């Protein structure tokens, strides 16, 4: 029954299944990108840390700004690889994207408590 439920769920969402607890990229995150299986000069161009700006984008060489916020690392990796293929920069790019430093979580602010009335 669980398999059938998963298949129906997958069909409704286009198989964009995200495991529970898998972190999403957000503004302020620092991501480490590593382009693999390329000449060193090419890897030196790409392999570095990229900070996600307030608009949720990272600025990549030759590609410009790419929206990554709200995506998992896997989704962002696939999107960047596709942009590299579509832009005819690389035919079969292979890259690794990791969180270097996640943006701090902002704790919700507690509402001030009303003072208690003194009953005499």
Image (tube, rainbow, N blue to C red):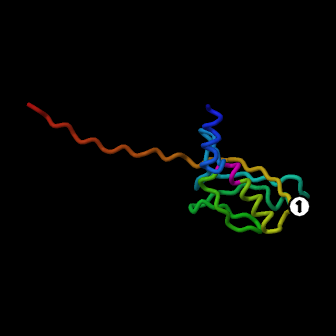
* In the rendered image, the vertical position of residue 1 relative to residue 39, given as above or below: above
Left or right: 45, with 15 as reference point:
right
Q: Nearer the viewer, residue 26 or 118?
A: 26
Considering the image in quadrants, where does the N terminus appear? top right
> Disc 1 designates what residue?
41
The residue under the point 75% across, 53% down is 33
Occupied quadrant, residue 120: top left
Q: Residues within 10 Å of mark 1 (few under 14, many from 20)?
A: few
Tell me: 119 left or right of 15: left
The answer to which of 93 and 47 lies nearer the viewer is 93
In the rendered image, residue 6 lying in the magenta stretch gets the answer no
| Residue at 85 percent of width and 58 percent of height | 92
Q: Position of residue 24 (x, y in %)?
A: 61, 48
Q: Which residues are magenta?
A: 72-76
Q: Quadrant of residue 110?
A: top left
Locate residue 95, reporting x and y percent: 80, 53
* Residue at horizontal 60 percent and vertical 39 percent from the top: 21
Residue sticking out furthest to the right? 39
Q: Is residue 88 above or below residue 72?
A: below
From the top left corner, tell me how far across and down residue 18 is, in percent.
63, 44
Residue 114: x %, y % from top left: 24, 42
Say whether residue 75 is magenta. Answer: yes
Dominant SS type (magenta): helix
Between residue 24 and residue 120, name the one nearer to us. 24
The one of 103 and 15 positioned closer to us in this rendering: 15
Element on which disc 1 rests:
helix
Q: Who's the residue at 63% across and 38% down the image?
A: 6
């Amino acid at each position: 029954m669980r398999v059938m439920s998963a298949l129906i769920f997958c069909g409704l969402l286009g198989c964009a299944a995200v495991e529970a607890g898998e972190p999403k990229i957000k503004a302020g995150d620092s991501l480490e990108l590593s382009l693999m299986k390329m000449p060193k000069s090419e890897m030196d161009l790409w392999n570095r840390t990229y900070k996600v700006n307030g608009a949720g984008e990272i600025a990549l060489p030759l590609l410009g700004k790419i929206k990554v916020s709200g995506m998992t690392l896997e989704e962002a990796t696939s999107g960047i690889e596709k942009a590299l293929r579509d832009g005819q920069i690389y035919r079969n790019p292979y890259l690794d994207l990791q969180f270097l430093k996640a943006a701090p979580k902002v704790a919700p602010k507690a509402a001030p408590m009303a003072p208690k009335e003194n009953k005499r």
